[in-house]
Image (spheres, rainbow, N blue to C red):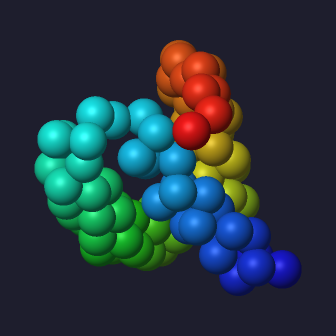
Amino acid sequence: MLSLCNNLFGISNTSILPELVKKDLLITANSLLSTSQQVARLVGSTVGGILIAYTGEATVIAINAITFFVSLAFIQFIRYEYTPK
């Protein structure tokens, strides 16, 4: 189930980007998105492993849940107006 949701999110994330940035900034936006995803995977795995070792699984799951709510709060600031093409 997690893999399915991850795939759907990835497709949605990539699909909406051209609608959110100007065409001349699309390459830069794609590069920044890709770089931030790779850094998050590397740093997130490392920090997650360290946190599990020192605090336990329950604390790390709680922190992960909080980060989803923080992400939701930031997503609320995105202003998007659909214009048919």
Q: Residue at x 58, y 67 (%)?
A: 11
Res 8 visible: yes
- Please tell me how many numbered marks the rendered image carries: 0
- Residue in the foreground of this view, choosing between 7 and 26: 26
Task: Give the quadrant of residue 44.
Answer: bottom left
Residue 84 spot, x, y in % from top left: 63, 34
Q: Residue at x 59, y 21 (%)?
A: 81
Q: Vertical placement of 20 versus 49: above or below? A: above
Q: Vertical placement of 15 versus 62: above or below? A: below
27 lies left or right of 61: left
Q: Residue at x 46, y 39 (%)?
A: 19
Residue 59 spot, x, y in % from top left: 64, 54
Question: Which image quadrant: the N terminus?
Answer: bottom right
75 lies left or right of 61: left
Q: Residue at x 56, y 67 (%)?
A: 10
Q: Vertical placement of 41 versus 75: above or below? A: below
> Furthest-front residue in view?
85
